[in-house]
Image: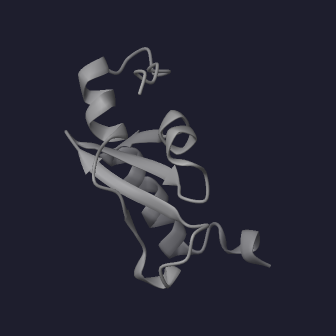
Amino acid sequence: MARIPNPYPTLDDAKYDTVVNGRYLKSTFSNGNAGCLSFAAADGLIGFQDDKLPLAERKARTLIFNQHEMAAFIAGAKNGDFDHLLE
């Protein structure tokens, strides 16, 4: 498989590859179904992949955030900031 180009100019290619190819896990609330977000952590970064996509496309579309960005998202979710998206 060809190397996936790194779309993050401030992220080292080796770290990008480590996150993209990491061990991705789903929420226990997904009931094992496709169509959920999967997450992996490596080198202080968190990758998000959409598991309903084929593997190559999933890897090519990986979103990567640092721990501070993820902490802000989780705090907002716990605060109900995104509840309106489920209505």
- Any part of residue 40 in sight: yes
Instruction: Give x and y (percent) for residue 8.
Output: 45, 21
Residue at point 74%, 68% (across, down): 85
Q: Is residue 60 above or below residue 37?
A: above
Q: Is residue 53 above or below residue 29?
A: above
Closer to us: 86 or 50: 50
Residue at point 44%, 20% (across, down): 6
- Any part of residue 12 in sight: no
Task: Tell whether 46 sits left or right of 34.
Answer: left
Residue at point 34%, 21% (across, down): 11
The quarter of the rendered structure image containing the N terminus is top left
Q: From this viewpoint, which residue is outermost toward the top? A: 9
Q: From this viewpoint, which residue is outermost toward the front? A: 1
Closer to us: 57 or 86: 57
Instruction: Give x and y (percent) for residue 9.
Output: 43, 14
Instruction: Give x and y (percent) for residue 26.
Output: 42, 69
Q: Name the image colouring.
A: one colour
Q: From this viewpoint, which residue is outermost toward the right? A: 87
Q: Is residue 7 above or below residue 44?
A: above
Task: Tell whether 35 sits left or right of 31.
Answer: right
Q: Residue 27 falls in which quadrant of the image?
A: bottom left
Task: Tell whether 82 sits left or right of 51.
Answer: right
Residue at point 55%, 77% (across, down): 33
| Count of numbered badges drawn on the protein | 0
Closer to us: 65 or 32: 32
The quarter of the rendered structure image containing the C terminus is bottom right
Instruction: Give x and y (percent) for residue 2.
Output: 43, 21
